[in-house]
């Protein structure tokens, strides 16, 4: 065989191999899609204090494992203890004010009784005077004077009744239902709650990471001060839209983690995201920004899948760890076979890159 014939044969072999691989990759992308764009996401709790204060002590170290309820750091208690003392003094003042109101109310009732007695006495005197006037035993001027005094006494009765109503409104309900006392008790509860929040505790099991908090730092309410990485594992994989048209929830998959080359883990498709950021329009008052491209074939849109690893590795990969995911539609045994071979090849290639 001449060199030209040998070269022509190798060209035909290369073209045939290229054609076979081209058809294979098209079929594989449709019935057994694989993506290296997969990432481990573990729940990250951003711990923020519920009060603003200076950090008195940090009770954990970087990358320390903590359990739910463990103290992470403590804040200066002095201002909150002072606020609690002030709230208790305010309650004592409320009790004293209520006692004064009750005393004023008792005095107002006594004034009302005296005003009623005076009014009743003047009413009797008016009746007697009218009888004497009919007998011409008293002057009209004297009768008019008695009537005026009676009206004044009745006005005093009305004023005493109004005073009683005013004091009753100020005093409100007696006992534990008193408004002033309930407000004072609420202020005490709030002060005690704020004081308890000076100990910041872990809300779940996990690992404290990227710890930069130091004693003496000032932390603000609601602003994250440190992060705790939880024990759960959510594996997300980004695949092209067209690769997912045969994929359903619950179908099997296999996963290779970059940090664990040579090991293949079983997984299942848990869910699919309903959209991507490009599909969300912000109502900001501006017109639509239409992307322009001069490419003949534009980039494919990727959609995110969430997968559940049936037997996750121990210890769990770090949050953000990379992985390769091979989807295996159960309805196609041939695709399952070749997909299994693909992912095992990738597991060995991870030893190299």
Image (tube, rainbow, N blue to C red):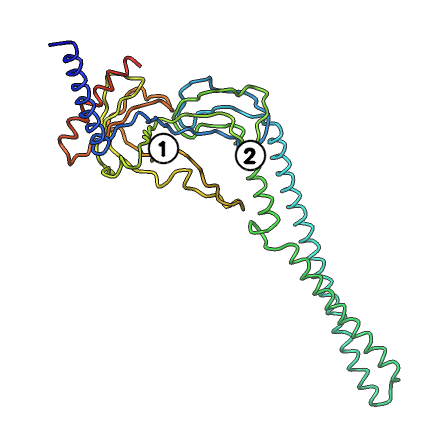
Residue 232 image-quadrant placement: top left
Residue 161 image-quadrant placement: bottom right
Instruction: Give the alpha-carbon distance from disc 1 to disc 2, as whole Å.
Output: 53 Å
- Secondary element under disc 2, as helix, strand or loop, is helix
Determine whether, in the image, residue 120 is placed left or right of residue 5: right
- Secondary element under disc 1, as helix, strand or loop, is loop
Earlier in the chain: of badge 1 and badge 2, it is: 2
Residue 299: which disc? Answer: 1
In percent of the image, x 21 and y 19: which residue is there?
Answer: 345
Judged by depth in the image, the label closer to the viewer, 1 or 2, is: 1
Q: Which residue is mark 2?
A: 194
Looking at this view, name the residue that lies furthest to the bottom.
135
Question: From what the image shows, is residue 181 above or below residue 126?
Answer: above
In percent of the image, x 23 and y 21: which residue is there?
Answer: 264
- Residue 20 or 39: which is nearer the viewer? 20
In percent of the image, x 59 and y 20: which residue is there?
Answer: 216
Number of labels in the image equals: 2
Question: From what the image shows, is residue 217 above or below residue 245?
Answer: above
Residue 221: which disc? Answer: none
Determine whether, in the image, residue 281 is placed left or right of residue 130: left
Determine whether, in the image, residue 288 is placed left or right of residue 184: left
Which of the image's four quarters has the N terminus? top left
Q: Residues within 10 Å of mark 2 (few under 14, many from 20)?
A: many
Residue 22 position, x and y percent, is: 22, 27
């Amino acid at each position: 065989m001449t060199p030209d014939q040998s070269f022509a044969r190798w060209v035909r072999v290369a073209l045939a191999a290229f054609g076979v691989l081209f058809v294979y990759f098209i079929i594989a992308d449709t019935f057994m899609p694989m993506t290296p764009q997969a990432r481990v996401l573990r729940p990250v709790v951003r711990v923020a204090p519920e009060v603003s204060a200076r950090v008195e002590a940090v009770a954990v170290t970087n990358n320390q494992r903590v359990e739910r309820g463990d103290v992470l750091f403590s804040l200066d208690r002095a201002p909150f203890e002072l606020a609690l003392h002030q709230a208790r003094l305010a309650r004592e003042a409320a009790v004293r004010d209520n006692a004064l109101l009750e005393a004023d109310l008792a005095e107002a009732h006594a004034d009302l009784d005296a005003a009623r007695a005076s009014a009743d006495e003047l009413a009797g005197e008016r009746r007697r005077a009218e009888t004497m006037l009919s007998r011409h035993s008293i002057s009209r001027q004297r009768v008019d004077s008695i009537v005026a005094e009676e009206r004044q006494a009745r006005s005093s009765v009305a004023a005493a009744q109004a005073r009683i109503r005013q004091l009753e409104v100020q005093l409100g309900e007696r006992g534990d239902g008193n408004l002033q006392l309930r407000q004072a008790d609420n202020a005490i509860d709030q002060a005690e709650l704020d004081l308890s929040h000076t100990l910041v505790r872990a809300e779940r099991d996990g690992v404290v990471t990227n710890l930069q908090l130091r004693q003496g730092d000032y932390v603000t309410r609601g602003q994250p001060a440190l992060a705790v990485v939880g024990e759960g594992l959510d594996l997300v994989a980004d695949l092209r839209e067209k690769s997912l048209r045969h994929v359903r929830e619950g179908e099997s998959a296999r996963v290779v983690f970059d940090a664990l080359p040579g090991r293949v883990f079983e997984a299942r498709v848990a869910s699919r995201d309903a959209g991507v950021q490009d599909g969300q329009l912000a109502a900001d008052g501006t017109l639509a920004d239409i992307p322009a491209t001069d490419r003949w074939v534009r980039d494919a849109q990727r959609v995110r899948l969430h997968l559940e690893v049936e037997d996750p590795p121990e210890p769990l990969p770090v949050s953000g760890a990379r992985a390769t995911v091979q989807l295996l539609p159960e309805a196609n045994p041939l695709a399952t076979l070749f997909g299994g071979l693909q992912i095992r090849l990738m597991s060995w290639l991870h030893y190299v890159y």
